[in-house]
Amino acid sequence: MSIVILDFGSQYTRLIARRFRELGAYSVILPGTASLERIQQEHPRGIVLSGGPSSVYDASAPRPTPGVLDLDVPILGVCYGMQFLAHEAGGDVRRAGKREYGKADLTRYGGELFAGIQGEFVAWMSHSDSVTRLPQGYEVIAETADTPVAGIENAQTRRYGVQFHPEVVHTPKGGQLLANFLAICGVARDWNAEHIVEELIEDVRRQVGNGRVLLAISGGVDSSTLGLLLSRAIGDRLTAVFIDHGLLRLGEREQVEAALLPLGVNLVTVDASEEFLGALRGVADPEEKRKIIGREFIRAFEREARKYGPFDFLAQGTLYPDVIESAGGEGAANIKSHHNVGGLPEDLQFKLVEPFRTLFKDEVRALARLLGLPDAIRMRHPFPGPGLAIRCLGEVTREKLDILKRVDDIFISGLREFGLYDGCSQALAVLTPIQSVGVMGDERTYSYTAALRAVTTDDFMTAEWARLPYDFLATMSNRIVNHVHEINRVVYDITGKPPATIEWE
């Protein structure tokens, strides 16, 4: 039993799924045009029609498959989804006289969706069209100063709509509204770490059968948690291989081995730095770097497979945001490819096992706690598979990597020293190709510029730059230019996501 979310192109669709899961209800995202048969395979107890950039009157506007609105389950329309519900039921939707974007106060609210909610209700709006005439059987359950129809309800048919986005953090009481929808649907709220682990173990056993699995492990929370999960699922038929591609942080190889070997993981470490750096020689384009690294990863694993195999499967810790950003979601733009989901060779010798493909980072951390992964790894900031290659702008060389490793070590160590590490979701240093004039010891310098970046986020789909104290940033700048003589200028990135991505490449 689940909540099925039909995606019509909203940037927030994945957040709807995440909010339902946080509330303990399993939810799945399907394309807005998914067939009735595909939807019914999920045994939905409720359906959500997501927002989207289209107008219901556009000839190319996405529409649910005929029959979806006739299903005997509650349906919630969000933004475009509400407009579509109203339009299909005989109401009118027109271009609003004033586009409403950002926070808005509901001047009135009520009905089943708002049951038990009291006080001020701040809602996040993002729409140009508005419902101007209600269809028969519906009533207005919410309004703002600029939008007289901000929420609608047909209690008899259990059809509901909100013009705002209850799933975003900018709608503080949106979680209570979504919880009310779950209550209307009668969904069992038993989606938790224990439930996820049980289901994933069953899925792995069903997919792998009696086969053997080769795990691509990095020492980060995703692959380490996956190693523990696979060990629990298939035991000694798992071999975890850690590829040292030469793009790791200072001392990271030794840290990975020290962290994972005591956990009983069957870990094999391979030094493939010469192959990776050789393949990257002369390459500056970030997409090409990612694809080269993805290809070299697979080649390295194929070599190890011949040595320790035979293996039938390659396991990867691909997460939902990886899939989304690589255009794995309906209507998603290709922002950047991830080494886990882009650049795989056509002659791949393994079948892929990706148990975390539909999970968010916070869900993986919850699994990690249950599986006994130490907090030192479990709460570690994400580190990209391509490693420092995508934080070393332009061509990657050993000299530039050495500079970047020392800068990164000073910054991350400083965050821990000042008690700021856990307050950031991800922090990193970037070596730019920019060289500028400076003065040190009364002498002219012409050296590299390093950029520091730290962000805070709940889901890594959007992020805010971390407001680190000025005194801390000044200390980091002084330490870096004094200890890394190839750097004479340090800058701090204050761009959110969007418009930027968290990584620079």
Image (tube, helix red, strand yellow):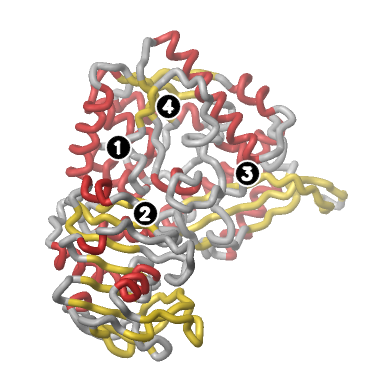
The residue pinned by badge 3 equals 407
Local crowd size for mark 3, using a 10 Å CA cut-off: few (<14), some (14–19), many (≥20): many
Residue 16: name its quadrant: bottom left
* Contact flag, marks 3 and 1 (Cβ < 8 Å): no
Q: Residue at x 60, y 62 (%)?
A: 494
The amino acid marked with disc number 4 is Ala
Which dot, 4 or 2, sits closer to the camera? 2
Q: Which mark is residue 431?
A: none
Tell which circle, 4 or 3, labels the residue nearer the N-terminal end.
4
Vertical placement of 93 versus 436: above or below? below
Marks 3/1: CA–CA distance: 28 Å
Which dot, 4 or 3, sits closer to the camera? 4
Spot occupied by residue 130 in the image (x, y as percentages of width and height): 41, 80
The residue pinned by badge 1 equals 373
The residue pinned by badge 2 equals 33
The amino acid marked with disc number 2 is Thr
